Image (tube, helix red, strand yellow):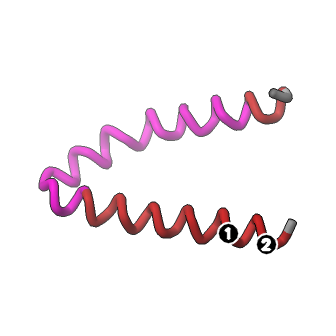
Amino acid sequence: METDQIMSAIFLIAVLALILPSFLSTNNKLKQVLNNLSIWTIIVVVIIVIIYLIN
């Protein structure tokens, strides 16, 4: 792994550590958590496909 990839991974883990507690406290119902995770999964997949098509 290159240094840029390692720094990006550390940054993403840090952001996850900051966001996850608030995300879990506001989404106390399982149905709501699954709904929000599915929305985020769709967003991430769309971004990955767009980046793949650009390259």
Name the residue at 16% across, 61% down.
Answer: 31
Residue 6: horizontal and vertical position, in percent?
74, 28
- Residue 29 in which image quadrant: bottom left
| In this view, 55 is above or below 4 | below
Residue contact at pointers 1 and 2, CB within 8 angstroms = yes
Residue 41: horizontal and vertical position, in percent?
46, 61
Q: Is residue 13 left or right of residue 51?
A: left
What is the three-letter code of the residue carrying label 1? Answer: Val
Name the residue at 85% across, 29% down.
Answer: 2
Whether residue 10 is in magenta: the answer is: yes
Q: Nearer the viewer, residue 53 or 9?
A: 53
Q: Which mark is residue 6?
A: none
Q: Is residue 49 left or right of residue 30?
A: right
Name the residue at 48% across, 68% down.
Answer: 42
Secondary element type, mark 1: helix
Secondary element type, mark 2: helix
Q: Is residue 24 left or right of residue 51?
A: left
Magenta range is 7-33
Q: Give the residue furthest to the left.
A: 29
What is the three-letter code of the residue carrying label 2? Answer: Leu
Q: Which mark is residue 53?
A: 2
Residue 50: horizontal and vertical position, in percent?
71, 72
| In this view, 54 is above or below 41 | below
Q: Quadrant of the C terminus?
A: bottom right
Which residue has dot 1 on it?
49
Is the residue marked by circle 2 packed among few (<14), some (14-19), or many (20+) residues within 10 Å? few
Cα separation between marks 1 and 2:
6 Å
Name the residue at 53% across, 39% down.
Answer: 15
Whether residue 39 is in magenta: the answer is: no
